[in-house]
Amino acid sequence: MNDLLTRPRDQKIIIALLLAGIVLIVYAPVSHFDFVDLDDDLYVRDNPNIKKGLTWDNMGWALTTFREGVWNPATWVSFMLDYRLAGLDPGTFHLTNLLLHAANVVLLFVVLQQMTGALWSSALVAALFALHPLNVESVAWVTERKSVLSTLFGLLTLWAYLGYVRKPCWQRYGGVLGFLVLSLMAKQMLATLPCVLLLMDYWPLKRLGKYWKEIRERLPGLVAEKLPLVIPVAAASVLTIRAAQSTQQALPSLDTLPFGFRLANAAVAYLTYLLKLVWPANLAVFYPHPGTSLSLWTAALATLFLVGISWVVWRGRGSGYLEVGWLWYLGTLIPVSGLVQAGGHSMADRHTYIPFIGVFMMLIWGAGRLASTFQLKKAWLLAASLFLVLTLAVLARRQLSYWENSATLFQHAVEATENNHLAHSNLGIFLLRSGDVDQSIDHFTKALEISPHFAPAHTNLGTALRRKGDLEEAVHHLLQALEIQPDIPEAYNSLGIVLAQMERTEEALEYFSKAREIQPDYITAYYNSALLLEDQGRIEEALQLYREILILDPSHANARQQVAVWEKRETVDRRQETE
C-alpha cells in the first residue's frame, strides 16, 4: 500500500481528490442558498427563455440574444440544462456552480503539474485558488456561472495547448481553438488567453528560450502560431460591445466618465485587489465607483506601488514564474479593469477569479525558492501549508455565509462599505418582497440620498409607495426614474399599475404597452395589461395577451386558467346560440 502511494500517478490522484473534497466540504452550504436580488432574477428566476428549457428554438435564442447586455450563449444553455433537471430549485443552480469550481480546481492542479513537473507547488496554487475568499463570489452567485464556466473551458484550452506543444498537429490545435471559443461563449473574460499561451511558452514550457537572442529568433514564429486564436477573440469582443450598447446598461461615454478617471480607478483597483488578497476583509458584492471624485493622489500612490512591484519582478527576472505570474495578473485583469466601464462598480471580487492564478504562482513558487535557500525542513513547510489552507477554508466559509439570501448579502454589503446605494436599494427590494414596506422605503430613500440619480431606486421607491397607497408620490418617483433612464420596463409597468388604480385606464395600458415594447418577454406587463383589458370588458384583446404569455411561458398557470375559462364560456355561448 505504501509503495502504491509513493507512485507519482497515485499521488496526483490523491491530491486531486483531496482538492475536490475540500472544495465540496467548504462550499456545501450553497445547496440550501436562495437566488439573490441582483441579476439572478433577470438571468434565471424571471427569465421566460430559461423556463422553456433546452429546445432548438432556445438554443437559437441563446446564440443571438443580447439580453442583459451580454453575449454568453454557453452560460444560457447551462442554465437551461439546470432548469430541465430541477426546475427553478435554486439549490441545483448553486450546486452546478460548485461542481464547476471543483472541476476548475482539479484542472488547474493537473495543468500546472503537467507543465512544470512540480507536484506540491501546483497543489498549493490550486488550493489557494480553491479557497481564497475573493473567489467565493464567483461560486456562490448563480449569475456568475459565466465566470466558472468560462474558466473551465479556459483551463481546458491550456490543457489542450500543452498536448499540442508536446505533439503539434492541426487536430490538437483545433482542440485549443475549440475550447477557447467555448470559453468566450461563456464569458469574454479570457479574451487575453492567446497572450497567456505566449507567457506559457516563456515559462514553464520554455519554448522561447532563456536568452534575448533566442527569444528574438523564436518570438515571431510563436506569435504567428497564436494569430488564428485572435479571430474568435476579436469576434467575441465586438459582440460584447454591441451587447452592452443594446441595453439600458450601455457603456458610458467619455463625457460621463473621462478616460483619465477610468485609468486612475483601474490603478487603484489593481492595488486594492492585491491588498485584499493578503487581507481579505470587508468583501462586498458591490463596490461603488467614485467617479470623478476619485483622489488623483490615491491613484498616483497606487500607480507607484504597481511600478515598484514591476521593478522588483524585473530585477528578479530569469526565474520565469515571477515574470509570468505578474504579467498574467496584469494582463488577464485588463478586460474588467474599468478602462471600458460597464456598470457602476469600481471593482469586483469576481474579477480576480482568473487573474489571481498568476499571483498564486508567484507566491508559491517564490516561497519554495526561499525555503530551498534557507534549507527549511519539510515538516515546517507542511505545517505552514496546512495552516494556510485551513485558515483560508475558515475565511471562505465565513464569506460564503453572506450569500445565503438577499438579506444577508446586502446587509453585509451595507456594513462592509460606505455610501453603497445599490446595496441599500437591493436590500429594500428584499424587504419589499417580504412585506416590510416601511423598512424598504427607508432603504430606497437612503439609496437616493447617496445617489439622487440612481434610477432603479426611484423605480423601487415608487413601487413601495404604490403598495403603501401613496399614489401621487409613487407617480412622482416613477416619472423621475424614467426621466433619468427612459428605458426601464419595471418603471413603466409600475406606473401602469398606479394609473390603473387611479382609474386612468388608457394611460395605464399605454405604459404597460411601453414596458412590453422595451422588453418583449416581460410577462408581468403582459399579464397586467390582460387583467385591465378583461376588467374593461375587452375580452378578445385580453385573450390575445394571455395566449402571448403562454407562448413566452407555457407553465404560466394564471394565464392558462384565464384562457381556459374564456374559451369554455365561448363554447357554451356557441352551443346556446345553436340550440
Image: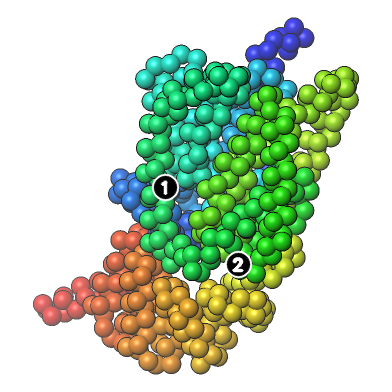
Residue 427's label in the rendered image is: none
Residue 37 drawn at (x, y percent): 57, 63
In the rendered image, residue 277, in percent from the top left (x then y), is placed at 73, 45
Q: Secondary structure at mark 2?
A: helix
Say left or right for 77 vs 119. left
Q: Which residue is mark 1?
A: 237
Secondary element type, mark 1: helix
Q: Which residue occupies the foreground of this view, 40 or 336? A: 336
Is 494 situated above or below 376?
Answer: below
Give residue 233's quadrant in the image: top left
For image coordinates 64% across by 20% down, the residue present is: 116
- Which badge, 1 or 2, comes first in the chain's sequence? 1
Q: Is residue 453 left or right of residue 52?
A: right
Residue 177 vs 150, above or below: the answer is above
Q: Which residue is mark 2?
A: 291
Q: Residue furthest top?
A: 3
Residue 546 horizontal/vertical position (percent): 31, 70
Tag 1–tag 2 contact (CB < 8 Å): no
Res. 556 in view: no
Quick one: 561 or 44, which is closer to the camera?
Answer: 44
